[in-house]
DNA sequence: GATTAAGCGAGACGGTACGTCTTGTCTTTAC
DNA sequence: GTAAAGACAAGACGTACCGTCTCGCTTAATC
């Protein structure tokens, strides 16, 4: 007895093609940036028909969003360390990002992500969460409050937003990204 | 006996065409956004040959940059007020920007500007300066320090950057833009 | 004691699907013409998987050929009448075809058949036989010779070919298709 | 003084591109036939953008029509000879066409032309005129009447149509194309 | 009855070509 | 010498079909 009413007929989606496509998106994004990433280029590199892309994603920003979601666009080294000392950790992390941004390629990566985010709210949210969200800055700030390293009445959500926002602003608008700028920025945020 | 002081031969640049082009850029930008703004569309709307555009600007982001520089892309109401009370002024200003961003069209305007900024550093700098720079937030913060409304050892440049960055992050990544969020954000920045 | 002469295992070919496919081909051919008839469209209209078509026919011209063979593409009224008077019958028949060709839709039907014939020799032969072959013109001419209405040394095969050929030429290249043109043509052929 | 009111501004059509395109169409048509001639293939072979083709022609049949009009698709040898003897000339000419049609490539050329004609009435008319029209069969038949080789009350237009039609029918539907068939056909037409 | 082939509907897949759009350059005529 | 007009090579866009290939049924004939 057990209901059957199974799924649907027809060949199932090819996981192999999906992986090939996301691989290609990731590599093209990193090599050429968001603006000159093309669906045709992705299809060609992935060895896939264009229709297979359009069947599952509607825009190139959707493609990029899925890559981002799967963590294919970011170097892992960018994760926020946790030595116990909040200030040192944040300075270290911001410093790493600044270092990445001092390299034109790295800067391009970041501005490309921002460009992608302007085309797709999901990417924006993901960026926000990845950089500043539960997994990282916000969590560390909250932990810092609990550990007594931060006054409990500091509005951690807003501070996290301000810190990450400052990084983005520096990426698109210039502004100092030398090591000491990391110290200044973090100290300004931590008050 | 007319003065000669001749520069070079041939017809001088047509100011009329220049204005028509910038008008068209501004209107297309506002109607369709940065991504779907095209040189051809601008030329057509301006009643101008494409070459006339390419002769004086090299990319569409340059066009947009010049529009931004001439203040054609922004509603004037967005300038930071000065009632003497720094906190109130900032909350008011941030609140206005949040209100703009709550409307999808306004949100599109802002994300389009950010998109343009990712393609052109000048635009980024301009954005940074217009929103957070000498003319506005930074200047008001500095004035606030002088007026004793802000502790003199607060790093005003960084705070300005953080505030404007938070706005941009909210534009691309979501995040609260209700009136009370303006209060929270400004208070977080002012410590 | 029934013979077994067994076939093979597995489900037998579905006659229902076959009919649905040929129906769809016929309707699409008549509505859209040979050039814009597609296998996918036929499959969709017939409620059939593409593979079921490809299993039994290799090209769309094969499909059309089978339709033609089953008489699904032609109005029946086009069959050559037999009143006993060869000349009158031919003029009548040619006149009917001319009438069909004066209507753009009918003209399209004929040119579509010719287009199909250029892609598939079977269709060409079938067209030739159906229009000019044993069942009709050639047979009537031969009968006419026997009935003494046509000189016995007239080369009936060639005349039949010439008459049908003239119709086709008028279909693709224009040329008069008024009622009196039928008289002229038939009289020219009958000498 | 002297009216100027000259033509129009902008670069004039490039004759070089036009020639390259028609060359490519002609070569592709001859090599691959009408059905597998593609606009993209023509553009590539001609070293031309697709838009340059679409700017001046709307369909591939228009392209082929213009080639035909410029005499780029036909071997010249197919012109009807004129030795003074109408019957001999026609037999010779029909024989040459039959010879061409006995070769698969030649047959393909002819059926491709017919296929093109089904898609474009101009091509049909051109084919009709080139093969049977003023320049050839009809003219020779008319001349034959004047020379007393043909009874003056024979309907030359219809006979010409019937002869050319018979050729086309043989091309698409089979039918004898041996040398003696040329004799039979011409004699049937000449009565 | 269980097994085994085929047929079938659905539909994903790698491709090719379509016809359109835009880019940045070039060429002409008008002012 | 600048400008409007517009042709040009290039190439990406998103769509339509092609013919092939799984899938999970269903339908007989064979064991």
Image (cartoon, coloured by chain):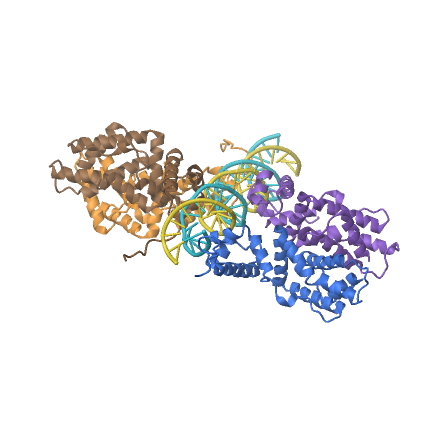
Chain colours: A purple, B blue, C orange, D brown, E yellow, F cyan
* Residue C147 visible within the image: no
Rendering coords of residue D74 (x, y %): 31, 35
Q: What is the total number of numbered labels drawn onto the structure image?
A: 0
Relative to D8, is C86 on the left or the right? left
Instruction: Looking at the picture, tell me which residue is in the foreground, D91 or A46.
Output: A46
Image quadrant in which the C terminus of chain B is located: bottom right
Vertical side of D183 occupied by D21: above or below = below
Task: Tell me which corner region of the image, top left, top right, bottom left or bottom right, holds residue B92.
Answer: bottom right
Rendering coords of residue A27 (x, y %): 64, 40
Vertical side of D122 occupied by C134: above or below = above
Instruction: Looking at the picture, tell me which residue is in the foreground, F10 or B81.
Output: B81
Image quadrant in which the N terminus of chain B is located: bottom left
- At 76% from the left and 45% from the top, the residue drawn is A96
| Residue farthest toward the top in the current orientation of the protein | D179
Rendering coords of residue B175 (x, y %): 71, 59
Vertical side of C126 occupied by C45: above or below = below
Instruction: Looking at the picture, tell me which residue is in the foreground, D122 or A36.
Output: A36
Rendering coords of residue D97 (x, y %): 28, 32
Task: Tell me which corner region of the image, top left, top right, bottom left or bottom right, holds residue A187.
Answer: bottom right
| Residue farthest toward the right in the current orientation of the protein | A148
Relative to B98, is B26 on the left or the right? left
* Residue C135 visible within the image: yes
- At 65% from the left and 52% from the top, the residue drawn is A117
- At 40% from the left and 51% from the top, the residue drawn is D10
Instruction: Looking at the picture, tell me which residue is in the foreground, C173 or B48.
Output: B48
């Amino acid at each position: 007895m057990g209901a059957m009413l199974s799924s649907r007929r027809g060949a199932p989606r090819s996981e192999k093609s999906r992986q090939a496509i996301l691989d290609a998106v990731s590599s093209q994004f990193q090599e050429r940036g968001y603006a000159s990433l093309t669906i045709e280029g992705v299809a060609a590199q992935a060895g896939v028909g264009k229709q297979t892309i359009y069947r599952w994603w509607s825009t190139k920003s959707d493609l990029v969003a899925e890559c981002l979601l799967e963590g294919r666009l970011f170097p892992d080294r960018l994760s926020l360390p946790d030595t116990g000392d909040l200030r040192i950790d944040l300075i270290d992390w911001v410093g790493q990002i600044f270092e990445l941004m001092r390299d034109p390629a790295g800067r391009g990566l970041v501005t490309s992500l921002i460009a992608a985010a302007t085309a797709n709210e999901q990417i924006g949210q993901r960026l926000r969460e990845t950089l500043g969200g539960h997994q990282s800055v916000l969590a560390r700030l909250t932990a810092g409050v609990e550990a007594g390293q931060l006054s409990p009445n500091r509005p951690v959500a807003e501070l996290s937003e301000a810190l990450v926002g400052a990084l983005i602003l520096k990426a698109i608008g210039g502004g100092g990204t030398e090591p000491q700028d990391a110290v200044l920025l973090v100290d300004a945020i931590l008050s």
